[in-house]
Amino acid sequence: MAGRARNRVVAALAEAFTARLRYKAAALFFALVLWVAASAGEPAARYVDVHLVPVVDDDVRLVGAVPRVRALVVGPSRELLKLYASPPVLRRGVGDASEGDSVLVELRPADVDLPSGIGPIAVRDLRPRTIVLRVEALAARRVPVRVAVRAADGVLPPESDFIVEPDTVLVRGPRRVVNGLASLATVSRVVAPGEALGEVPLDTAAAGVRATPSRVRLLVRTRPAATPAPADSPRAPADTTQRPRAATPPDSTPPTAGRR
């Protein structure tokens, strides 16, 4: 009797879970959808990443990576999910900076720009509130071009053998590098006899600067060959003019007395 009763209970439970399974699965699905829709409209608070864009002057550039910044946003959950695909943007100006300075920048929630098409979301906090940015001062000036071309036999021709067009370029880069740059060399090239040079790039990578223009034109200066004098050319006549001799001063030696 006990075994039969247990079998009936097991059969009833199996029928309760398996009977009309399609209807039960559909009911469970719609219940889940309603729960997601209801929870998506509820307000929530989450931290999302912020795209930080430092605004610097033309004579200053950033050195190193920008620190990570996160914002505490409050709003409907379905709107907060959109911020993971389109993060907010924070543009912050960097004040006056000298070469090698570390600039302390204060961040404010009011400076955060939310993407368009986002519902009512409020930015409550930022982490961190202050960041340190490394900046480097830039400078620009004109420097002469130095020719770094050698012949195939290893001989370095004198720079007077070339015409450089233009002979000066505008370089831009870190102030300490630009101020210590006496000239900017061309890329080293080996030239075979009779090879045309044309345009040669400047070696800006080795110098750590940018140049305008980045290429110069090298022309080989043509030197006139020495013309030997003809063998039958008349020679200048010898100077046969007789010049008067200098007068001999009189003998001032006193006369010698005669012997007695």
Image: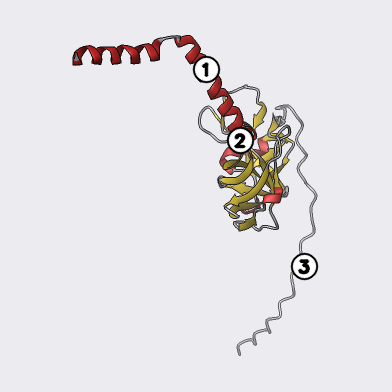
Q: Which mark is residue 27?
A: 1
Q: Badge 2, how many Cα within 10 Å: few under 14, some, many 20+?
A: some
Which residue does the numbered mark 3 point to in the structure image? Answer: 247
Residue mark closest to the camera, 2 vs 3: 2
Q: Horizontally, is 21 left or right of 104 in the view? A: left
Q: Horizontally, is 20 left or right of 187 in the view? A: left
Q: Which mark is residue 77?
A: 2
Amino acid type, callout 3: Ala
In the rendered image, which quarter is residue 192 located in?
A: top right
Amino acid type, callout 2: Ser
Of residues 242 and 66, the one nearer the viewer is: 66
Reading the chain from its start, which is encountered first: label 1 or label 2?
1
Q: Horizontally, is 186 left or right of 249 in the view? A: left
Residue mark closest to the camera, 3 vs 1: 1
Of residues 138 and 33, the one nearer the viewer is: 33
Describe the element under mark 2 as helix, strand or loop: helix
Kindly indicate whether the residue at mark 1 contacts the one at mark 3 (C-beta within 8 angstroms): no
